[in-house]
Image (cartoon, rainbow, N blue to C red):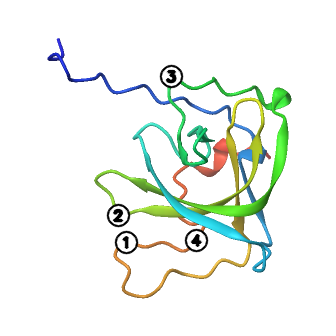
Amino acid sequence: PPQPGQQQPLRVRQAHKWAFNLRRQNVDKNFPRRGPFHVMLPVQLDVHTAMVIYDAEMKIRLGTEKDKPPCRPDEHVVEMRQDYTQVIFQRRNSNSQASVLVDSVCSRCLQCFFITDTTSRPAAPGAPGALPVGAGTTAPAHTLPP
């Protein structure tokens, strides 16, 4: 059993797979930007299935069992944001990372929805293990809806 004072790690919520979770589109370079926020992905989740939320302090983090569960895709109330927030997904014990932008949020469950730029450029040379923006997603292609 855990020692007193040691907290059990909170279980991370998993988002429902939905094509809107991560989209490719031309990103408006003049749109205001915030961030970056760094999110450490648990082993079993990827950019498509991790439930990332905007919490009450306007910080971006993984949703846990203490947060609202994610809406089903047909229940999301999607609100477009007035800025892009950069999120860099990283994996423990790995150099792989993926950079995405939050362009919208569900006002009911606070889940963030991401875009990647269709005109993404490779990362700066010399960045260890860096991937081009939008490359680092670990989901096999067959998990995406057609």
Count of numbered tags? 4
User: Which of 79/101 is in front?
Assistant: 79
Mark pair 4, 2: CA separation: 14 Å
| Residues at circles 1 and 2 in contact by the CB criterion of under 8 Å | yes
Q: Residue at x 59, y 37 (%)?
A: 51
Of marks 3 and 4, the one in the foreground: 3
Q: Which mark is residue 95?
A: 2
Above or below residue 94? Residue 79 is above
Disc 3 marks a residue whose amino acid type is Glu
Are the residues flagged by discs 3 and 1 in contact, CB closer than 8 Å?
no
Disc 1 crowd rating (10 Å Cα; few below 14, some 14-19, many 20+) is few
Tell me the tag on residue 65.
3
**Residue labelled with disc 4:** 133
Mark nearer the viewer, 3 or 2:
3
Q: Earlier in the sequence, mark 3 or mark 4?
A: 3
Q: Find the distance from the CA under tag 3 to the CA under tag 1.
A: 32 Å
Looking at the image, residue 66 lies above or below residue 44: above
Callout 1 amino acid:
Gly
Q: Position of residue 9 (x, y in %)?
A: 33, 27
Q: Earlier in the sequence, mark 1 or mark 2?
A: 2
